[in-house]
Each structure stands twice: as C-alpha cells, then as structure tokens.
C-alpha cells in the first residue's frame, strides 16, 4: 500500500492512480498552511467540498477548491495591506 490518501477508500493500493479531479486533502491543507500561516491565516479545513481558513481578525474565508480558497485569501490579504 502507498501512503497516498483517497477520500473514499482511505488509502490507494500500489498501481492505483488518483482521478484527475481528486484532491489529496491532507497535502493541499498542509500546503495552504505552509503558504499562509505566516500571513495571519489558520484553521484550514476541507469539509464536503467546502475549503476554509480563518484570518487572525476572525474572518472566515471559503472556496469550493483549494485554488478558489487561495484566491480568496490572496484578495483578503491584499485588502488588509
């Protein structure tokens, strides 16, 4: 078994491939945290297709994909500068 998480089966077995539109939530959340934690964002989560983060000011930002959430965070961060 590989260590890749799959949202339906838990783990992918050797030789299986993730679907082109499936997101490895654990990896994506780790990357979002790495990219934005020092910018004042925390509480990253993904639940039933809703990705979210909380700003230090308590604003809850959401998106339907990791990229959509990143765009919201970037716009929020720029507005705060």
Image (cartoon, grey):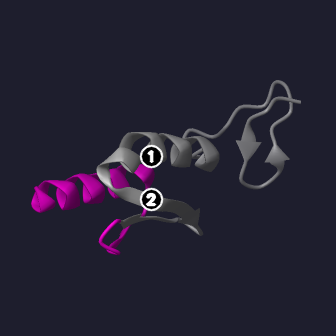
Residue 73 vs 35, above or below: the answer is below
Q: Quadrant of residue 81?
A: bottom left
Q: Residue at x 30, y 49 (%)?
A: 39
**Residue highlighted by disc 1:** 32
Residue that sits furthest to the right in the current view:
1
Of the pair 46 and 65, the residue shown nearer to us: 46
Q: Residue at x 54, y 43 (%)?
A: 30
Of badges 2 and 1, nearer the viewer stands: 2
Give the structural element (helix, strand or loop) at label 1.
Answer: helix
The stretch in magenta equals 56-81
Q: Quadrant of the N terminus?
A: top right
**Residue highlighted by disc 2:** 42
Q: How many marks?
A: 2
Of the pair 62 and 80, the residue shown nearer to us: 80
Give the structural element (helix, strand or loop) at label 2.
Answer: strand
Q: Is residue 33 left or right of residue 58?
A: right
């Amino acid at each position: 078994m590989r260590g890749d998480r799959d949202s339906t089966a838990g783990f992918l077995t050797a030789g299986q491939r993730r679907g082109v539109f499936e997101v490895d939530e654990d990896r994506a959340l780790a990357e979002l945290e790495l990219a934005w934690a020092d910018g004042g964002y925390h509480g990253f989560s993904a639940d039933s297709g809703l990705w979210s983060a909380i700003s230090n000011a308590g604003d809850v930002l959401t998106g339907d994909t990791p990229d959509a959430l990143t765009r919201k965070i970037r716009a929020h961060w720029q507005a705060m500068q």
